Structures are given as C-alpha cells and as structure tokens.
Image (spheres, helix red, strand yellow):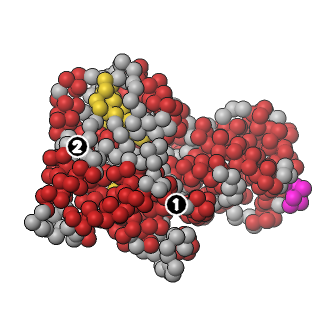
Amino acid sequence: MPLGAAGQEDRAAIEGAVVHNLPFASIGEMMRGREEELRELLYGESAMAITQAIKGLGGIGKSRLAVELGWRAVNDCLFRAVLFVVADSPASLNANLAGLAAKLGLPEAKEQAAQVESVLQWLEQSDGWLLIFDNADTEDAAGAVLALLPRLNRGRVLITSRRVSWPASVRPLELKKLDEETSLRFLLDRAKGRVKTDHDEADARTLARLLDGLPLALEQAAAYIEFNSLTFAKYLLDWEKDRARVLEWCDKNCGVPEAVAVTWQRTWDMLHPPARTLLRLAAHLAPEPIPLALFENSEARLSEACKLLEDVKKPPKKINTGDAVSELSRYSMTERGEETFSVHRIVQEAIRLRIPEKKRREWVEAALNLVNDYFPKDPPAFDVRSWNRWNPMRPHVAAIVDATDRIGIAEPTARLMNNFGIYLYTRAAYTEAEPLYRRALAIDEASYGPDHPAVARDLNNLAQLLQDTNRLDEAEPLMRRTLAIDEASYGPDHPAVARDLNNLAQLLHDTNRLAEAEPLMRRALEIDEESYGPDHPDVAIDLNNLATLLQDTNRLAEAEPLMRRALEIDEASYGPDHPNVAIRLNNLATLLHATNRLTEAEPLIRRALAILRASFDEDHPYVRTLSDNLKDLLGE
C-alpha cells in the first residue's frame, strides 16, 4: 500500500509512575492559608464528589490551589494520572485535551477531534485519575466543560472558575480570601529581605488589610519589598500614592481587583524598560507557558517595541531576554519554567488595561510581528522532527491572530493564519486548520481581490485539506481556480503552476480519472525539472506521483525507474533516515512485491519500517501499514 507523509509528537509512557502535566512547580510551605481546603479536597467529604468546582474572585489563588493539590496527589500517589487542562474557551479546552493523548501514550490520531475522543475514551475506561479544568470562566467555556461531564465518572474532575453558578451535579467549594493573620504571616515570612523596624508587624498588618487577602496581591507585594529591601512603612506610603492613579483606569467593572491593580502598578513603575516590554508583549499572548525562544534572537523587534513605552526616551539597543524574565520573576510578575515563562491572566488584563488607548493597536501589532517572525513561513519547517518546537506556540498564535483579526489588521495576520494552518494541517489537526484557512482566504480576497497569487495560495491550502477530509467535490473547483490564477499571474511554466497541476492531478487520480490526471502530472514534472533541476525534492514528489499512477495502470516497467529516482533524490536531500525516505522505500517495495521480487522488496520494507519506528510510535497508522505490508510480503 503506498503512503503519503505524516508524523506525531514524542509520547510519554505511563507505566511505573504517576502521569502528570502540571504547569508549575510546587511552592510547598509558602502555600499559606489553604491547608483546610487541600485536606478537604484530598481526604475530606469533598473527596467523595466526582466533580468539584473551586470558585472565587480573580487573583484569589484558584489555579495555584489546583496545581498544589495536583502535586500532593502526585507525591502521595493518590491517582495514576493527574491531568491539567486550560479551559478558558471551547477551543482551548479541545486543544489541551487533545494534547493529553501523547502524555497518556495513546495511539496516534489524525484530527484533533479524534485525539480528544481517544482521551475521553481513556478517561471513560480507566479508574484513578484526577482531571483539572482550569479557568472555565465564560459561559461558553463552562458549557463546554459541562457537556463532557457525563463521560467523566471513573475518576475525579476539578474545575476552577470565577463563575458563581454551577449545576447541582457539581459540588462547589468557594475559595475565600485569606484571613488577616494568615496574610500577615505570609508577608512577614515571604519578605525576609526587608528592612525591619520597631513597627514591622503593625505595618505588615496594615498592608495585609489593604491587600484584602488576595494571594496574587500578597505575593507581588512581598516580592517587591523583598527585592528592593524596603520597610513595610515605605511600601504603604507608595501604595497610597499609587492607589489614586490606579483608580483612574481600574474601576469595579474592569475585571482586575483593586488590590491586585495597585500592587501591579507599584511593581510596574520599578521595572526596567526591557522587562516592561516583555511583559506588555506577553500580555497579548495566551496565559499559558510562553517559549523563551520567542523573544531570543529578536533584538530588533524588542527594541522597536520598547520605543512604544510612554516614558522611555532612549530605549536600549539590545534587550537580554534572560535578564528581563529574571527581573519579572524576582517581582513575581511571571512564573518561570526551564525554557518558558507565563503571566497570570489577571496580570495580563491589568497590563492591557493600562496601555494608553492610542498605543493599544501598536502593541498588538508588535506582538503579532514577534510571533510572525518566529513562526516558520516555509512548510518544510513543519517536519515531524520539529513538532516539539512549534507545538508550544499553538495557544499563542491562536490568541494573537484572534486579537489582530478583531481589530482589523489584515497583514501579516492572514499570512500567519495561513502558516499556522499549514502547521496544524501537517499535524492532521484539520478541524483547527480549516477555519484559519477560510479566514485567511477571506482576508486576502478582501485585501487583494479575487485573482491575486496570495488568494491562490489560500485556495490551494484549503483545497488540500478538503481533499484529505474526503470532500473532493468541494476541493476540485478550488484547485481549478488556483491553477487559473497562478497561470494568469506567473505564466504557464512557473513552479506554482506545477504545484497546482500536481495537486489537481492527485485529485483526478483519487476520483479514478487517470487519463485526465497523467498529462497534468507529466507537465508538472517537466516544469519542476526545468525550474529546479533534476534533483530537487519537488521533482521527487512529481516522480513519485506519476510512478504511482503508472503502477495503478499496470505500467510497472515505466514506474520502477521513476520510484528509484525519487528515492535517490530524497536520500540526497534529507538523509537516509528521514520519514520521506521511508515512504519512497515502501512504495518501491510495494511495486517489487507486485512484480514478485520478494527478496528485493523485503529489505526495503524492513528499512522503511525501522525509519518510521524511530520517528513515530508503534501505534502510528504508517507504522501499522508498513507492519501489515511486511506481514503480507512474508505471507503471515
């Protein structure tokens, strides 16, 4: 059986240890004032509930409590799996559920919907797991979580949310503000590097009251005092000065508690310009771990963004990402991971609110350009072996393209949507990719008109997805329109035309119109050889497709040299152990099998299988296909 190209992420085995994907490290003894809630959730009457909702204000510590509970469950081996799913929107919920498939070692699935289904089936069939849905605050997000609950009764479900109302089937646990004594003790213990005075405890108590028992505000205030070696009295004095300024932009309806806003403002004023720049850019991304690599090697973009700060007259020429993130971490403005950092969603809201209205579009564009520069523009960069690099960017690309599309930034929004769609397409995440392809097409048609090459690019990508999801009647007119645009734009002998001819020929092949397909394939091959020379990977694709058609029309003697040549080109282009080489080996072995040359076919298919097993897991469909081909060849 001939193959195309596919791949998957590395997966973690679940044997021998508690599987978890908790996003932050435990804070241990600094988790103050929540022992009663932790004991209740883990060992009390609440532990008997299948579904529990931790509800409370923003900044009250719901997510931190859930993560800390998860760590205790992991360390005490209370569950076989502790799974954390960001659920702030239905799209985020589905994407993060799908991401659990690799963590649980489940068989590779093509589409995101299939990945989600495989995870849900595992949860339905397995006992002893804890599933945390984090930040299900909106009506849509809560509805998406509730729709899943009937299938989630073999383990425990924990929901964190600002929502007050939940159905009777969900046991509520309202997280209260920390009491004054707990807040006081936290401040005294956390700000050990402060300058102490005779009125230390009294001043700390006053600050504890002002911070209103909100853990996020307490942590940021204590970190500020600690880092700057202040007295509590000095911080209180500055607090009152800042409060009047904050009330100018933060009212009761802004979504940011006043205590958090004032604490944030005090810290913001002390940050150096590079740290402020990173924080404002990060505020326009998702509240999930951000790869540090996004900001590294982006000196020009960061320096340009730094100029947008209101009070910076001479921005630094070079911004050191590591130093800026370290400064933010010292002030507890970010949560630092090994190769990532994240910003609390309440802090993100405060940062966005504080940006002057006339500057807001520029900051959104700055974040867009940063992500666009980082995300690959060349589809070969989405090779299976690079998926681990690009996958962490999924929520951040989704967040920024949504923000820029809402305010009408056409370019490079459409290009980023298109490239992000290509990445998702290579992951076979078709349900995620399709709306991006369609939106990019709509933007480009509105910007450039219906006959622009950018529109042809978008049409081609959408048509490929429609073909792969068996909607051939929808795909064909898009492919023919793509071909017409590119021929009119570039002339009949351009590589873009060859691509279009090849894609249309593949569709004709799939619909058994082989006589129509063959001349298109031959023309595509001729154009690519003339454009790139005889040894280009695109020529290998053309050769492979034509050889497969020749084989299907029983012209095996013509097909074989084309397959061998395609194999040679890909080995020279990608190296001997690339999945594309395995595909060429398999197709050649299939032809040799068809001509009864089993002793020649067997080593090729064994080599192909070894390559794919090194790239994918044993349950990947390509590995299974080659395993079946080998068994068929051996007569097993």
- Which residue appears at 79% of the width and 65% of the height? 531
Numbered disc total: 2
Q: Amino acid at mark 1?
A: Ile
Binning the other alpha carbons within 10 Å of mark 2 as few (below 14), some (14 to 19) or many (20 upward) gives many
Q: Nearer the viewer, residue 272 or 252?
A: 252
Locate residue 328: give its quadrant. bottom left
User: Reading the chain from its start, which is encountered first: label 1 or label 2?
Assistant: 2
Q: Amino acid at mark 2?
A: Leu
The residue range painted magenta reads 485-492
Labelled disc at residue 355 = 1
Q: Nearer the viewer, residue 202 or 304?
A: 202
**Element carrying mark 2:** loop
- Which residue appears at 48% of the width and 27% of the height? 143
Residue 414 location (% of width, % of height) = 68, 53
| Left or right of 632 in this view: 568 | right
Binning the other alpha carbons within 10 Å of mark 1 as few (below 14), some (14 to 19) or many (20 upward) gives some
Q: Quadrant of the N terminus?
A: top right
Q: Compared to 262, does 50 lie above or below?
A: above
Which residue is under mark 2?
A: 178
- Which residue appears at 27% of the width and 22% of the height? 49
- Which residue appears at 18% of the width and 46% of the height? 180
> Is residue 582 among the parts visible in the rendering?
no
Q: Nearer the viewer, residue 345 or 244?
A: 244
Rounded to the nearest angstrom, the CA distance separating label 1 from label 2 is 30 Å
Residue 126 location (% of width, % of height) = 32, 26
Residue 209 location (% of width, % of height) = 23, 50
